[in-house]
Amino acid sequence: MSWLDRLKEAAYTGPSGTRMVFLYGDVSVEFDKRTAAFQFAGVDGSYVQDNGLSERRYPLTCLFAGPDHDREASAFEGLLAERGKGRLEHPLYGTVDVVPFGTITRRDDLVSGGNQTILDVVFWSTIGAVYPSSQFSPRQEVSLSLDRSKASLAKGFSKAMNLATEARRASSKLSIREGLRNVQGAMGKIAAATDSVNLAFRDLQSQVNFGLDVLIGQPLLLAQQILNLTTLPARALAGIRSRLDGYADLLQRMIASSQSNPTLDASIIPGIVVRASNDFHTAALYAGGAALGSVSSVLENAFTSKPEALLAAEAILEQAEALTPWSEERFGALEQVDTGEGYQALQETVALAVGFLVEISFTLVPEKAIVLDRPRNLLELSAEIYGSIDDPLDFLISTNRLTGSEILELPRGRRVVYYA
């Protein structure tokens, strides 16, 4: 079956329901990729946000020939002039809902090409909705990607760990417990900011710690528990900056705990390569959990200003940038092949989270600043800037990091930021 056999009859059905067949010349289709590039200070490269596709545009030369070509062309012209959505049966590109767009040109070549009329028209595809919506909101897309990344990281950990002997299991338990201490050190105070989160955090710590003798034989379940523990503090009612800083601290702790070993010669210390590999994959699991914890923190936060959202995007990108070279260097030192499954899922989650933050930043108020020309009372200033002294007062204090005497009276020359 050749391409000629796949060609179909060309026809247009107007909004009134009248269908007309027409001959045609060469065909083509056009559409745009809606993309936007964003650069962040101190980060190499750009984040390219993919916003989907534009409409498809079908320019067609519609031909009418024969003794009644003028009447047929006039009837077709009337269909094109009807208001509303029509249906184009394209000879090559299928059937689509369209609206004739722009200038429609009719040409009657009475002298040079009698017995035919030509109409040039561009059909634009239409979704038929004034306020379209995607199946998932951007926040839901990030959340679903977060779940996929957890599953991929847990699966990768389970495949990579070599726990065939008791000695290897004992060594891995030490690495896992060291990771638990790092999670407590980096995120313990943050989890404590909310009683319910703190209780769940402590309970999950105990489950992993005291059940490790059993869990070490079930690496997939163990990895899932570790990732749940690591991302749990993201739900605490601590400031977004504190949560992101905490996860950045945890990431650096895990990187430092598994730096390149100067000797990986198994002939000197039997089994050292396997133990180094297990240690690295354990550290990588906690490190990946730290990056996902930052993404989860974003989902749990209600952003109130544009700079806050963009700073969060930069923080997440910086963590991903720190994670990548370390992981590649360690795989190279261990002479192992990275399948990339967990890394790819993690990168997708990071990209979606950054895109979400950039998108919502356009809807948030920008940062403004004033330099006080005289000492000001904080209540008076809050009422002047925000028109209220209730919730905005706490927000003004936290965003300017006011402490001590400044809460009673702001000195002359103090720079105050606000969002309006």
Image (cartoon, helix red, strand yellow):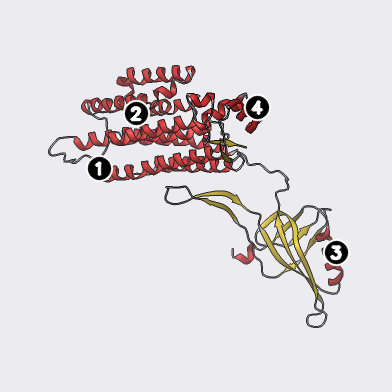
Of marks 3 and 1, the one in the foreground: 1
Question: Residue 194 appears at what percent x and percent y?
Answer: 48, 20
Most foreground residue, 298 or 225: 298
Lower position in the chain sequence, tag 4 or tag 3: 3
Write the residue at 37% across / 36% down: 156
Lower position in the chain sequence, tag 3 or tag 1: 3
Lower position in the chain sequence, tag 2 or tag 1: 2
> Mark 1 packing: few (<14 Cα in 10 Å), some, or many (20+)?
some
Instruction: Give the residue number, with chain letter if any, for mark 2.
Output: 219
Instruction: Give the residue number, with chain letter if any, for mark 4.
Output: 388
Most foreground residue, 247 or 69: 247
Lower position in the chain sequence, tag 4 or tag 2: 2
Q: Secondary structure at mark 2?
A: helix
Instruction: Give the residue number, with chain letter if any, for mark 3.
Output: 75
Say whether residue 345 is visible.
Answer: no
Q: Secondary structure at mark 1?
A: helix
- Res 334 label: 1
The image quadrant of residue 362 is: top right
Of marks 4 and 2, the one in the foreground: 4
What whole-number distance in Å separates the C-alpha atoms at marks 4 and 3?
65 Å
Question: Residue 407 appears at what percent x and percent y?
Answer: 52, 25
Kind of residue at disc 3: Ala
> Mark 2 packing: few (<14 Cα in 10 Å), some, or many (20+)?
many
What whole-number distance in Å separates the C-alpha atoms at marks 2 and 3?
72 Å
Q: Secondary structure at mark 3?
A: helix
Q: Which quarter of the figure is the C terminus placed in? A: top right
Q: Secondary structure at mark 4?
A: loop
Kind of residue at disc 2: Pro
The vertical placement of 213 against 400, above or below, is above
Most foreground residue, 377 or 69: 377
